Image: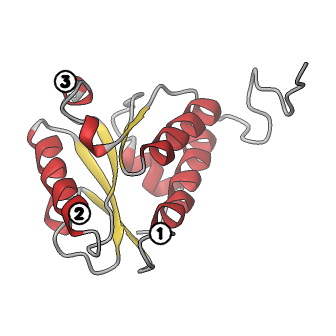
């Protein structure tokens, strides 16, 4: 699936204003949550897979979109844990938007929307997942009528004193 305005509208079809990002590394998911805050003025949360049962799962509601970045199958333990987490997220009624490497048949049955990533080695995989998530943030902001080149209340540079 390619991410464009039509897909953003589909993902946000119920006007849900909260989105979660799950996956490893957690810093990457928090970064994407921050981009969605800055551009689309939403309040998402980014967290690592291991944190799911320590709070975020309590907030999942029917129809809530949750982006899940699945590690490549080469990282078997993390991959299998993420597939299990996707099942738990869906069991609570969330809509799962899953980013996984092309051909990962383990996740397809549990993804409401599947974004296939090119197969790369495990090290650059989080960077590859960054591209569609950045596109989503920009497209969501555009759909909501916001100027992605001039987000409100953000400084273009920071002065260190």
Q: Which of 21 and 76 is in front in this view?
A: 76
Residue at x-position 68% and y-position 34%: 146
* Secondary structure under the numbered disc 2 in the rendered image: helix
Discs 3/2, front = 2
Q: Which of 60 and 54 is in front in this view?
A: 54
Please tell me the numbered disc located at residue 58: 3
**Which of the colour schemes (rainbow, by chain, secondary structure, one colour) is used?**
secondary structure
Q: How far is disc 2 from disc 1 in space, using C-alphas?
A: 14 Å
* Secondary structure under the numbered disc 1 in the rendered image: loop
Q: Is residue 72 above or below residue 135?
A: below
| Residue density around tag 2, few if under 14, some if 14–19, many if 20 or more, within 10 Å | many
Residue 139 at x, y percent in the picture: 58, 49
Residue 103 at x, y percent in the picture: 28, 81
Residue at x-position 17% and y-position 55%: 81
| Residue density around tag 3, few if under 14, some if 14–19, many if 20 or more, within 10 Å | few
Q: How far is disc 3 from disc 2 in space, using C-alphas?
A: 23 Å
Please tell me the numbered disc located at residue 160: none
Q: Which of 66 and 1 is in front in this view?
A: 66
Give the quarter of the figure containing the C terminus. Answer: top right
Give the left or right position of residue 75, taking residue 18 as reference.
left
Q: Which of marks 3 and 1 is nearer the N terminus?
A: 3
- Identify the residue position indicated by label 2 in the image: 79
Q: How many marks?
A: 3
Residue at x-position 50% and y-position 37%: 33
Give the left or right position of residue 60, taking residue 155 as reference.
left
Please tell me the numbered disc located at residue 123: 1
Q: Which of 146 and 56 is in front in this view?
A: 56
* Residue 77: quarter of image: bottom left
Q: Earlier in the sequence, mark 2 or mark 1?
A: 2
């Amino acid at each position: 699936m390619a991410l464009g305005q039509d897909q953003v509208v589909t993902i946000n079809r119920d006007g849900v204003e909260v989105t979660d990002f799950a996956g490893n590394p957690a810093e990457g998911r928090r970064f994407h949550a921050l981009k969605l805050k800055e551009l689309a003025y939403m309040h998402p949360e980014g967290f690592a897979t291991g944190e799911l049962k320590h709070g975020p799962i309590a907030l999942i509601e029917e129809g809530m979109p949750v982006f899940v970045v699945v590690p490549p199958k080469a990282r078997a333990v993390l991959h299998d844990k993420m597939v299990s987490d996707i099942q738990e997220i869906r069991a609570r009624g969330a809509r799962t938007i899953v980013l996984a490497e092309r051909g990962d048949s383990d996740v397809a049955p549990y993804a409401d929307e599947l974004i296939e990533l090119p197969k790369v080695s495990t090290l650059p995989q989080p960077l590859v997942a960054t591209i569609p998530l950045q596109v989503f943030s920009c497209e969501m902001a555009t759909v909501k009528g916001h100027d992605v080149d001039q987000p409100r209340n953000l400084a273009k540079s920071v002065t260190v004193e």
